[in-house]
Image (tube, rainbow, N blue to C red):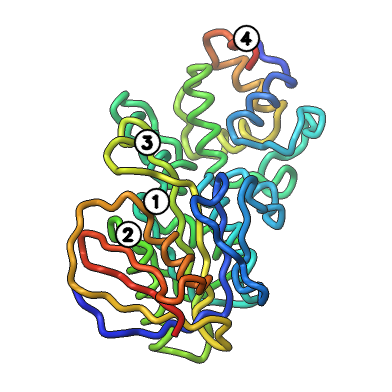
């Protein structure tokens, strides 16, 4: 897969990790990246709604809450595995011929995170949910950019999140990391990130695409950052 | 079977993940749905399934009688007393 160079305008960014971030991620003096780890901040969600938020949803809400503009905003959500733990719980109930929990059913679908966000904020703007294997972060961002280009009159909120896979699926991928990233795609840009996607092929990489992207936004390494997966070689650098 | 209002409140809190509530915060005759505690239709389904699993009460029909059974903690206690089987699990 190839993609000609794309310049992505980003107003601001937020990232949250379940534990300490796997690499040093400086937020920068301009405060472009809001970085946190530990307990996600979802105090702005009413208790009756908060109780239904999964670990993944809490991570995503934390990041979206840091950068989302007020009022209606288009949203793209991406995750490779989504609510795998809830899905597994449903499958176990079905295998045991037990009744399936309506709460788990309603909050396990792939668009559950942006759906719950929209309900919370009364947001009627379009929402899209992407899953694209190990490149879910990258393709979700391309989708958000495409939506912004189609109508640049307002920003697009991009939210990516991943939880660790439960047993017996945990061994199917090299590593899991509970984390989320939110990017506000649009103007005025606090960072412009150039993306180049060249042909390349690599078995399942041991590192996460989202983390490499965040390193590129910090702009410390000059040449940006690169990540090669099954679909190609992704490179991001400051435009 | 006999279940006290306090036990029923603990059961509701646990089943619906009402992490910010304690049994003392729920009135015996406070409406659970529509105003009151503010539970919704998904909670009603969830509670129905949990009651069937724990107390083997018969499957609820979507009728007026069911709405009356699910109205308050007191009506649920009464419903389980007349229809439920099995024992309340220790600590639940």
Residue A82: which disc?
Answer: 1
Specify whether A95 is left or right of A183. left
Q: Nearer the viewer, mark 1 or mark 4?
A: 1
Query: x and y percent of residue B85 in the render?
Result: 52, 11
In the rendered image, which quarter contains the N terminus of chain B? top right
Whichever of labels 1 and 2 marks the residue nearer the N terminus, that label is 1
Residue A20: which disc?
Answer: none
Residue B90: which disc?
Answer: 4
Q: Nearer the viewer, mark 2 or mark 4?
A: 2
Helix, strand or loop under label 1:
loop
Helix, strand or loop under label 4:
loop
* Contact flag, marks 1 and 4 (Cβ < 8 Å): no
Helix, strand or loop under label 2:
loop
* Contact flag, marks 1 and 2 (Cβ < 8 Å): yes
Label 1 to label 2, Cα distance in Å? 8 Å
Label 2 marks which chain's residue?
A
Specify whether A191 is left or right of A65. left
Label 1 to label 4, Cα distance in Å? 35 Å
Label 1 to label 3, Cα distance in Å? 14 Å
Label 2 to label 4, Cα distance in Å? 43 Å
Label 2 to label 3, Cα distance in Å? 20 Å
> Which residue is depicted at the point 64% across and 66% down?
A66
Residue that label 2 marks: A131
Relative vertical location of residue A75 with respect to residue A137 in this rendering, above or below: below
């Amino acid at each position: 897969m190839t993609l000609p160079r794309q310049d992505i305008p980003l107003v601001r960014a937020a990232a949250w990790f379940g534990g300490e971030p796997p690499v040093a991620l400086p937020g920068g003096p301009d405060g472009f990246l809001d970085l946190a780890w530990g307990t996600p901040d979802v105090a702005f969600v009413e208790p009756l709604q908060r109780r239904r938020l999964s670990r993944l949803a809490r991570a995503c809400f934390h990041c979206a809450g840091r950068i989302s503009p007020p009022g209606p905003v288009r949203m793209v959500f991406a995750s490779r595995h989504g609510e795998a733990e809830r899905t597994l719980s449903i499958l176990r109930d079905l295998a045991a011929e037990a009744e399936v929990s309506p709460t788990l059913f309603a909050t396990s679908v792939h668009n559950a995170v942006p759906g719950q966000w929209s309900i919370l904020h009364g947001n009627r703007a379009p929402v899209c949910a992407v899953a694209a294997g190990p490149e879910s972060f990258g393709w979700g961002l391309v989708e958000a950019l495409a939506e912004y280009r189609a109508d640049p009159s307002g920003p697009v909120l991009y939210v990516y999140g991943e939880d660790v896979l439960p047993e017996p699926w945990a061994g199917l991928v090299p590593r899991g990391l509970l984390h989320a990233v939110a990017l506000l795609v649009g103007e005025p840009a606090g960072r412009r990130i150039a993306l180049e996607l060249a042909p390349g092929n690599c078995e399942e990489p041991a590192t996460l695409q989202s983390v490499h992207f965040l390193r590129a936004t910090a702009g410390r390494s000059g040449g940006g950052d690169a990540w090669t997966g099954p679909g190609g070689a992704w490179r991001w650098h400051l435009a | 079977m006999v279940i006290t209002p306090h036990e029923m409140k603990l059961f509701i809190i646990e089943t619906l993940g009402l992490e910010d509530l304690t049994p003392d915060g729920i009135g015996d005759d406070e409406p659970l749905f529509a105003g009151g505690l503010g539970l919704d239709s998904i909670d009603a389904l969830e509670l129905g399934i949990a009651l069937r699993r724990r107390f083997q009460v018969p499957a609820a029909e979507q009728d007026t009688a069911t709405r009356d059974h699910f109205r308050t903690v007191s009506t649920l206690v009464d419903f389980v007393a007349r229809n439920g089987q099995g024992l309340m699990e220790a600590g639940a």
